[in-house]
Image: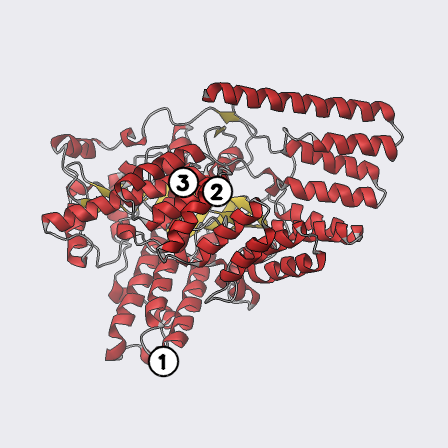
Amino acid sequence: MSGSRLADRVLLLGWDGAEPETLRTLLLNGRLPVLQSLLERGSCLELATPRPLFARSAWTSLATGKYPHEHGVLHDLCINVYGDQLQPITRHNRTTSALWNILHRAGLQTHIVGWPVSHPAESLTGIFVSDRFASPESTPLLTQQDGPTVLPREAFSHLDDRRVSQSEAEEIALSQLLPAQLIGLREYSRVEAACRDILAQSATLFRTIRWCLDVQPWNFSACVFPGFHRSHELAHSLERLSPTGPELSKHLISGCYEHHDLLLGQILSQVDDSTYILVISPTGPQAATSSVLGAHNNHATFGSMNRNAGLAVFKGPNVLRLTRTMSRNLLDIAPTILTMFGLPYGEDMGGRPMLECFEPGLTPSSVETWDIQSTNTTPQSNEWKEDREDNPKEEVYHLAVEYLIELGYVDPLDIAAQNSVNLCRRTTELNRAISLLDAGQIDKSIDVINDLKEDHYDSHRAHFLLAEALFRARRFEASRQEIDLLMCRGFENPQLYYLAAANEFADRRYDRALDELACTQRGISRFPGAMLLAGNVHLRKRDFSAAQEAFEQSIVSDGPTASALDGLAAVKIHLGKPEEAAMHALDAIDQSSTLDRAHYHLAIALILLNKPNEAIGALRNWASLDPMAAAPYRWMARVHQLQLADPVRANACRLLGKEVIRRRRTSLANQRAAST
C-alpha cells in the first residue's frame, strides 16, 4: 500500500565525520553561509546514532533503516571464506536492502556516489559510483576481480576523465587547509601531501555528482564526502607535531568545513527550489576513525549513554521552518525518504517517518518488509556475474589485504594472522551484542556476551557490556557484581562509574549514586550525562534547589536536551512555579515529542494553572505515547471530576484506566506462560 507522494526529487549530501559542535561554532561566526541559508529555510535535527559508533556501520544504518546487527556491518574488516585472513568489508557483507534498492524496485531514477560500504557498484536505474572510485591515492589499485566501481560501465570513461589527482589540487583550495606560507616547505611536505589528497578526493566526488545530476534525470541522488573525518584525523596528528600544531589544526579544520560549504553551494546551484535537500553527518569525528582490529573509541564499545552523535539539515517546499533543533534517530531517515516518495516504509525498520518536520498532509504507509531477497543477489552486469562465477572463492580486495599486511594490521605469519582473525571475530560479536542491546533485545544480547565470556573471561569489554545489559534488564545486583569485578581488576573509567551510579539510582540508593557520579569527573571537567543523572537523583531526594542547579549545568555542558528541560519542568512544579514548568515542558516536547514524561509534566502544570481542557489534551498525548499506562486516565478522571464537573466523562476515564490495567495483566501472564 502506497501513501501520498510529496517529493519528486530528493538530494542527500553526506558530510562524513563533521562534528556538530564545530558546525555550530562556524555557523555562529558566519563561516558557512550556504549551510546557514539552508538552516534558515528548514529544520535542524540532532540524530541519535545506533551503536557501535563507527562510520561504515552508521552510514549503512542510514541507508537501510536497520540496526547494525540486522544489516551486518559490524566491523571494518571481515574474515575470508577460508577463515584464516581478514579483508576489508564490502557491500556483500550487507544483509538487508538499502534505500537505493527499494527505490530501484519502485522504478525511481537513482544516483549514488561514494556511499561507504558500497563497493562493488550495483546496477540501478541511474548511475552508481562506489566508495572505491575516489579512494585516496595510497589505496591499492583494484583489479577486474574486485568488481566495478561504476555502473553502468559506459559511464566510467566519462567519470574517469573527471578524477582529480594530488598534483591537480588548486593552490587556492590548498591554502584553505594549510597556511600559504607553509606550502612548498620541506618540513611540511607530508602534511601538504595529505591535504592535497583530501582535496583531490573531494574534488573527484564533487565533479562526479555534478556530472550525474546533469547527464540523466533523477528522483533520488546521494553523495558522501569523507574529507571531514580525514581532516580531523590529520588535525589530531598535527596537534602533537610541534608547538604550532594546535594553530595549524584549527586552520585545517575550519578550512575543510568552509571548502565543503563552497562545494555545497555549487551543487545546490544545479537544483531548483522544488528539490528537497538533506545535508547529514551520522557521526562526529570521534567515531569516524575505523575500528580496525577492535581499536574502538570508547563510545563504540563502552558506555550506556544514548548520545546524539549526528546532525542533519533538512530543507524543502513542505519542510517546516523550525527555530529549535529536534532530536530524532538516524534510523528515521530512510522511512522518511520513502514516505516522501509515496512509498511504504518497512515495518521491520528501526525508525519511523518524521512527520513533524513537514506541513500537515503527509500520509505514511507501511509494508511488513522490503527484504524479499538478499541484497547479495542484486542484479549486476553480465560481465561482473561471469567474474564471480569463474572465481567462486576469489575474495574481493585481495590487493587491499596485502596493503593491510604492509600497514601492520595483519601479520603474514600464520599464528599472528589467526590471532587477528580471532580478535576480529570477537569484536564483531561484541558489536552485535551492543546493537542488540540498543534495539531492546536485551536477553539475546546477554546470551551473546555470555558466550564471549566463556571463551574470553578476561575481556573487560565483555564484562562491561554485560553489566550494562544486566542493568537494562533491571537485574541490578548482577550488574553490580560485574562492575565490582572490573574495579577489582583495576579497570576504572568515567563510563564505568556512570553505569555504577545509574545502578544505584535505579536501586534507590541515592547517596551512593551521587558518590559514584563524583568519580566520573576525575580527569575531565564534565562527563556527558553525569549532571543530568545528578539532577534526577536530587529530584528523588526532594532537594529541588540542587536538582535545578544540576539540570541547568547539564544544559550548559550537554546542550538543552529534552530530558534536562523536562527535569527543570518537574523541579518548577515542586517549587510552585507552574508557568515556568509549562514553558520547560513545552521546550522538552519541542526537542522530543515522544518523551511521555514531558507531556505528563505539562499536564500537571496546566492543571495548576487552572487550564483543564489544555491539560486533558496533554494527558491524551501521554496516553497515546504509553498505551500500557493507566495513570493518564486517572488524571483525566480527576480533571473531569474536580475541574470540569463532568462525572460521566470522569467515570468513562476510570473505566479506560481499568481496561489498560486488565490488558497489562493479561500481557504479563502471557509472557510468563511463554517463558515457562
Q: Can residue 299 be seen in this view?
A: yes
The residue to which callout 2 is attached is 477
Q: Is residue 326 above or below residue 470?
A: below
Q: Which of marks 1 and 3 is nearer the N terminus?
A: 1
Residue in view at x 74 percent, y 30 percent: 633
Mark 3–mark 2 Cα distance, whole angstroms, equals 23 Å
For the C terminus, the quadrant is: top left
Quadrant in the picture for residue 424: top left
Mark 1–mark 3 Cα distance, whole angstroms, equals 41 Å
Left of 259 or right of it: where is 322?
A: right
The residue to which callout 1 is attached is 243
Mark 1–mark 2 Cα distance, whole angstroms, equals 49 Å
Assign a secondary structure to mark 3: helix
> Residue 240 appears at what percent x and percent y?
33, 73
The residue to which callout 3 is attached is 435
Name the residue type under label 3. Answer: Ser
Residue in view at x 35 percent, y 43 percent: 431
